[in-house]
Amino acid sequence: MLRSMFAGVSGLQNHQTELDVIGNNIANVNTKGYKAERVNFKENLSQALSVGTKPTTSKGGINPLYVGIGMSIGSIDKVFTQGDLENTGNRLDLAIQGDAFFLLSDGEQEYFTRVGNFTTDSNGYIVYGNTGLRVQGRVADATGDISNQTRIQSIALPFGQKAPAKATEDVQLTGNLDSNTNKVSKVLAASYAKTASLTSVGNWADVLTANPAGLVIDATNNQIDLEIDDDADGTINTTINLTAGTYGTLKEVVAEINNQIDANREISGEIVAEVYTTGGNDYLRIRTTDTGGADTHITLGGSFSGAATTLNITGTGSGTTASTYLTEIPFFEGHLTDGDIIKIGGADKAGFGRTGSFTFLADADGLGNPSTLGDLINAIDSVFPGAEITVDNNGNLTVTDTEAGVSERTCAITLTDANYNSIATPTFNTRIEGRDAGEHQTSIQIYDSKGKPHTLQINFTNISSLTDPDLWRWECTIDNGTIEPSAGNRGYMKFNPDGSLSAIEIEDGMPLTFEPGEGSATMEINLDPGQAGYFNGLTQFNSTTSAVPNMQDGYGMGELYDYSFDETGTITGHFTNGVSQAIAQIAVATVNNPQGFEQVGDNLFQVGANSGMPVRGWAGSTIQTEISPETLEMSNVDLASEFAKMIISQRGFQANSRVITTADTLLNEIVQLKR
């Protein structure tokens, strides 16, 4: 009888514990991140009344008989199911979706929590609620890189942190260049040079002709003697030995001659050695723009096949028959040089009604320096009013005399030397319909290594012609021309018939290079017009010109003014210079058995004897979990379930109390038996 009473007492005690757990769950129904608990009962040890026996051949087996003596608490479990997420709009509120925990520290002990209601202290550290525990993670370096080797530490929001400036390295070009724009002419290069072509004397040409096998060099064919004397400033005397194995090509010999010339730059005028190709052969040539007297000369001698050779190359004052004057007339976008002479007509041009010429000096006669074929036509017309100046379909410039009383005659424009000796008749090979329509100008702000902004301006000029269609010239200037680029500032862009980019050419093959000054590093900028054959950059269609540099990768110095979190717990800082880069990442941790955590209050846990050691890592990479910014995880308590459990527990309590009262009644009857 007493046994039943003790069983009832155990039922009362343990159902009371269950009611305590249910009450605690209901109390924390609105506690952020709270995980509900549940009570599991177990049967206490039972008393055996009889043991069981096994069956025999003639008799069945007998089951054992037990009488229980009550129940006890088997376990009280934390239910770590995911709670619903509540959007708070607070940037420092974070919620974990998955099985991980936030990692906290007081400097000595580690703590774990599911609740991400974080704040910052006066030093900028991210802390958990009002506990003062600092959130742990890893901090990025000055460039925003977060290394896997970075140690886990307390995280602070570094307001006032500066993002260093970055010099511009790449500029991307996009948009369209209108294929229907008028073409701008390519103008005569004014520095037409008197050029001496060293012709055969003895076996000279045969010896210095380049061939696939290189120069022919032997014991007697191995030396060039060079003398340059202007009888005014200085003299260069040097000997270049063509020892076997020293020079492999004619270009290498030419380069060595130029080295010798550069070593003595007091020689007046321009003197350049170069390779001259004609008739399929390469020849050594000395070119000079020196306008000195007859005594200015260049002498080349040498020992070739046993025969000495000497040639005298003179300036414009002599006209020595030993020199062959050639004229180089390159065509490019630019200005005529001071001193250039253009002659129209003349006594040697019989039949043309008038003669005349004009010398282009800086702003002489108000003409200035024509920069296009159109400007040149206007200048000629101002000197010869009434003459008709036309450009035919092949781009050839023609002047027609229409003066009254004179039969109409035509004369092509000629370029002359200082003595009005005809040098060449220039052929422009470009039609001109106007200047402004064929040019497009655009700009973008770039930055040097100290973050100082500069204006990069790019000018596009349509120089397409009948012989070279779909061709544009581009040229870069820095800060409206106040900074002079040293390389890579001009070239050409060629387009395919379908409007896609064909190629970009830089005249010197170098990136855009210039010195920004004020101690900043030399800038080298790559201009990227897109991929050849595609339409992802510059194009040329019959549509409005819209070419622009749409992106550059430089920026000035900036200060941190705002931040945001992403799903990996990475804190991205936003700086005043428009740069956004990582400044830290919040750590998360998992354990094998979170049920084994020790609870220390405030929704905090510590490692317990049966929890297992924590594995620290990063959301979305080493730990498969996700962090939701501006949200908090709600309690996972299910009120309906808790109330149902409460009813069941209440009935269990009531039933156990009835066992006790019933046993008491029976005991009372036993006591009454002696009466």
Image (cartoon, helix red, strand yellow):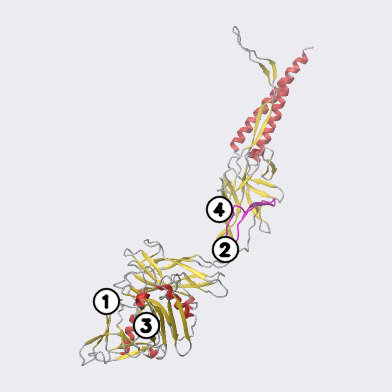
- The question of residue 106 being in magenta is answered with no
- Residue 340 position in % (x across, y down): 37, 86
Residue 514 visible in the displayed image: yes
- Closer to the eye: label 3 or 2: 3
Ranked by sequence position, the earlier of labels 4 and 2 is 4
Ranked by sequence position, the earlier of labels 3 and 1 is 3
The residue singled out by tag 3 in the image is 195
Q: Which mark is residue 669?
A: none
The residue singled out by tag 1 in the image is 394
- Residue 480 position in % (x across, y down): 47, 77
Element under label 2? strand
Ranked by sequence position, the earlier of labels 4 and 3 is 3
Q: CA distance from mark 3 to mark 2?
A: 60 Å
Q: CA distance from mark 4 to mark 3?
A: 70 Å
- The question of residue 138 being in magenta is answered with yes
Q: Main secondary structure of the magenta part?
A: loop
Quadrant in the picture for residue 230: bottom left
Q: CA distance from mark 2 to mark 1?
A: 58 Å
The residue singled out by tag 2 in the image is 575
Few, some or many residues within 10 Å of mark 4 (<14, 14–19, 20+): some
Ranked by sequence position, the earlier of labels 2 and 1 is 1
Quadrant assignment for the N terminus? top right
The residue singled out by tag 4 in the image is 566
